[in-house]
Image (cartoon, rainbow, N blue to C red):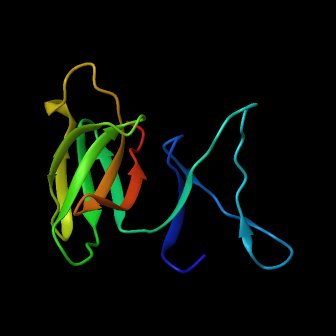
Amino acid sequence: MAEGEHLFDMLACAEVEPVGRADGLAGVRVYLPRDGVACVAQLPRRLAVTRAGAALQVQADLPAGECTLVVANSDGEALASQAAQAGANAIELSALPDDAEPACVKLLRDGQLMDIATLPER
């Protein structure tokens, strides 16, 4: 895995830590129940998310092109979106519906996933 990249389990909405192997490569360890599936993506780390109550602070290292930040639930469904700016971005979770359960922030460029990060605990 290259410097500045990370692994993310898209279906569990969680970071995955690489596990070193004897051959010098990295593997992953993911628990799968019988007939379970996982989808682990290797992505450049472009987002850093911090939380203070209902406010998110998202530091974004943007690729070229128009980018969007999307707050999504654990099923990947968009709950809110806004244009992304290089550097600091503020997202107010209190504007979401009361029954919303935000789980992650996605960085999209022209609809394609550039990075994803879990929401920190409150």
Quadrant location, the C terminus: top left
Return the residue nearer the eye: 63 or 58: 63
Residue 26 at x, y percent in the picture: 72, 70
Identity of the residue furthest to the top in this view: 99
Q: Is residue 1 left or right of residue 13?
A: right
Q: Is residue 55 above or below residue 61?
A: above
Residue 39 at x, y percent in the picture: 57, 50
Q: Is residue 14 left or right of residue 97?
A: right
Quadrant location, the N terminus: bottom right
Return the residue nearer the eye: 98 or 1: 1
Which residue corresponds to the image point at 50% horizontal and 48% vertical from the top-left? 10
Which residue corresponds to the image point at 42% horizontal and 39% vertical from the top-left? 121
Which residue corresponds to the image point at 32% horizontal and 49% vertical from the top-left? 105
Residue 90 at x, y percent in the picture: 17, 52
Residue 34 at x, y percent in the picture: 76, 31
Q: Is residue 10 above or below residue 26?
A: above
Q: Is residue 72 above or below residue 61?
A: above
Identity of the residue furthest to the right in this view: 22
Q: Is residue 39 left or right of residue 70?
A: right
Return the residue nearer the eye: 110 or 68: 110
Q: Is residue 116 above or below residue 46?
A: above
Q: How many marks?
A: 0
Return the residue nearer the eye: 41 or 19: 41
